[in-house]
Image (cartoon, helix red, strand yellow):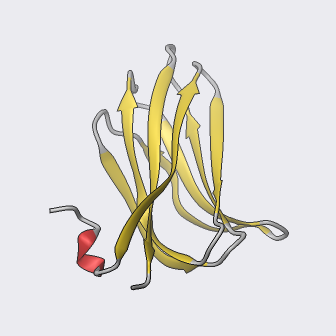
Amino acid sequence: MNPFQRYGKEILLKGTHSLDVAAGETESVDYTLTEDLTITGVSYKTANIGIDDTATFQIVHPVDGVVNEFGKDVFLKSEEAYSFYAARLVTGLKVRVSVTNNGSEAIKVRLNCIFHRDQ
C-alpha cells in the first residue's frame, strides 16, 4: 500500500527533479506551489550514495525565507525512501530540497514532492 493513500485525498506527484551532485558540493531545487495543496512529504531515490551524504527539506516563503524545516542533514538511504511532513501549503510557498555530497564521487538523487488536493 502506498503510505500516502491513508489521507483519502487525490495524490499528486509534483516537482519531480533529478539532482546530480559533485563530490563536496551542495545542490538545491525548489518547487513553487501554483495552488493551495496539502503536502505529506518528499520521496527520493538515490544512485551512488555515500554513507555521509545528506539532505535538508524546507518550506520557504517568497519574502520571509525559510519558515520551516522538516528534516535537516538527514542521511540519505541507498534505496527509495520518504521524508514525511504533513501541512497545508498556500500558493507561492516553495518546497526546497538541498542535497550535500560529503563523499568523493558524484551522486544522483531523484525527488518527488507528494501533494494532495482536497476532494
The x, y position of residue 105, in whole percent, is 49, 14
Quadrant location of the C terminus? bottom left
Q: Is residue 47 left or right of residue 91?
A: left
The x, y position of residue 36, in whole percent, is 59, 78
Can you say whether 68 is above or below 7 in the image? Answer: above
The residue drawn where x is 55% and y is 55% is: 57
The residue drawn where x is 85% and y is 69% is: 63
Instruction: List the single residue furthest toward the left.
Output: 1
Q: How many marks?
A: 0
Instruction: List the single residue furthest toward the top.
Output: 105
Q: Is residue 37 left or right of residue 7?
A: right
The residue drawn where x is 42% and y is 42% is: 75
The x, y position of residue 52, in whole percent, is 44, 32
The x, y position of residue 89, in whole percent, is 59, 76
**Looking at this view, is 26 or 5 the one in front?**
5
Residue 2: which quarter of the image?
bottom left
Instruction: List the single residue furthest toward the right.
Output: 63
